[in-house]
Amino acid sequence: MQRDGLSSVDPAQAQALEAELEWLAQTLERRLQLYFKPTPGDTPPWPDPPSLKPDCPYGQMLLGLQLDAEERLMLALALTPLLRPQLLDVLQVRNDSTHRPYTEFGGAAVGQPQGGFVPSGETACFLLAGEQMAPRLAVMRRFLPQGRLATGDLLHLAPAAAGEPPLAGALQLSPSFIDTALPGVMATAGAGHDGAPVGLPAQRISTGLQWQDLVLPAATLAQLQDIELWLQHSRTLLDDWGLGLRVSRGFTALFHGPSGTGKTLSACLIGQRCGRAVWRVDLSQVVSKYIGETEKNLSRLFDAAQRQGWLLFFDEADALFGKRSAVSDAHDRYANQEVAYLLQRIEAFDGVCILASNLRHHIDDAFSRRFHSVVTFVMPKAPERLRLWREGFPARVDLAPGLDLERLAQAHELSGGTIMNVVRHACLRALGRGEAVVRPEDVEEGVRRELLKEGRSV
């Protein structure tokens, strides 16, 4: 049966997930029995894992990974809040002695309104090790960066809340695992409202414009096309021609110039022409006040970008790639370590990374020396501004006879982004009058407002 244009679910996939969660439920029940009512003497065997079949995405992926039983249980535990959250309700029982939840059961404090139990690293330790120290240490080792769960980009621990131990972090499946093992559920399991995978400090950006809509000087366009050539032919150059033995396998570019001159649009159009997704890094999510978290965020971002072939775009990059300061205290020393780590990851990144900045001299010299391309975005000249004015207004809008676009282009030195702000203002004024005619006073008022915003005289 199909509803709302969505295909029915693969029965084999549903059956495999049902069996995996039932195995988890039986294992959890057995662990709780041993915890609350320990049995002397011989311990009954643990439930056997269900057999895997290659007739569904979940079975195919787990068979290919050749995971052991404990790794499978950890993945199933992380899947439970998504597929069967009520299964973990049993762990929300309160301790009669302390009148609060059992510490050993774990559970991440992520503020879920529905009150569901979100398993943490501590939950995994309890499930697999109980109160035994040696098995607990073995489980903890599975969360190390060199462990198979991390190197295979399957599962990781989210950062714990301030003051909490690392194992208090929630179990988080990677977007790539969800996308492969549970195709079609990424929108609910691994993506926010903007389509960005949960846990990655970036969001995908795109444009409805085309390359011919880009209004830039010929020299700037030629430099952008160099990046396009690299995306199209780097494999041939590095592997077939052997240049990969002598040069880095990635490409790093700096876009610098005033706001509104086309840096973000250019990155989107390069990705569009080359069939690459462009992801803008959210610096507010990258930088953390907790030692080591910034590096961890960047590591996950670069790993995901390399696997998926994304083009990374760091807007306002000087906030993260700025000049290193003189070391006067531990904070300065750590900040400089972050810059050094960034440099290392960019050099090792097998892809295209674009840094955008309004001021080139704000970028650290250690980065500047390693740019493969430095593209300068300048304020448009009068002919370019005239084209921006002419092409900016929608086709359904009529321009009043007194509106002189050539005079506007000559009189006001505005960026493309600023011109579009004026166009939007003028069109809204026309709509407010109930007509589709833009008057000269609408545009003049829009220009005046933009100049005042920039602190310039009208």
Image (cartoon, rainbow, N blue to C red):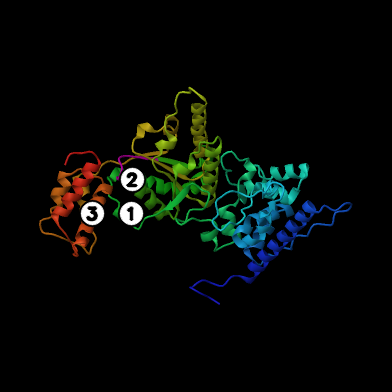
Disc 1 designates what residue? 211
The numbered disc on residue 409 is none
- Of the two numbered discs 1 and 2 on the same chain, state the one appearing first in sequence: 1
Q: Is residue 71 visible?
A: yes
* 269 on left or right of 97: left
- Of the two numbered discs 1 and 3 on the same chain, state the one appearing first in sequence: 1
- Of the two numbered discs 3 and 2 on the same chain, state the one appearing first in sequence: 2
- Magenta residues, dominant SS class: loop
Say which of 74 and 340 sits in front. 74
Badge 2 marks a residue whose secondary structure is: helix
Say which of 421 and 93 sits in front. 93
Dot 3, how many residues are within 10 Å of its Cα: few (below 14), some (14-19), or many (20+)?
some
Q: Name the quarter where the C terminus is drawn.
A: top left
Q: Residue at x 49, y 31 (%)?
A: 335
Q: Position of residue 262 (x, y in %)?
A: 32, 47
Residue 260 location, quadrant: top left
Question: Mark 1 is on which residue type?
Answer: Trp
Question: Mark 2 is on which residue type?
Answer: Ala
Question: Mark 3 is on which residue type?
Answer: His
Dot 2, how many residues are within 10 Å of its Cα: few (below 14), some (14-19), or many (20+)?
few
Disc 3 designates what residue? 425
Q: Residue at x 25, y 55 (%)?
A: 424
Tag count: 3
Q: Residue at x 17, y 50 (%)?
A: 445
Q: CA distance from mark 1 to mark 3?
A: 25 Å
Badge 1 marks a residue whose secondary structure is: helix
Where are the magenta residues, as a range? 254-263
Q: Position of residue 106 (x, y in %)?
A: 66, 48
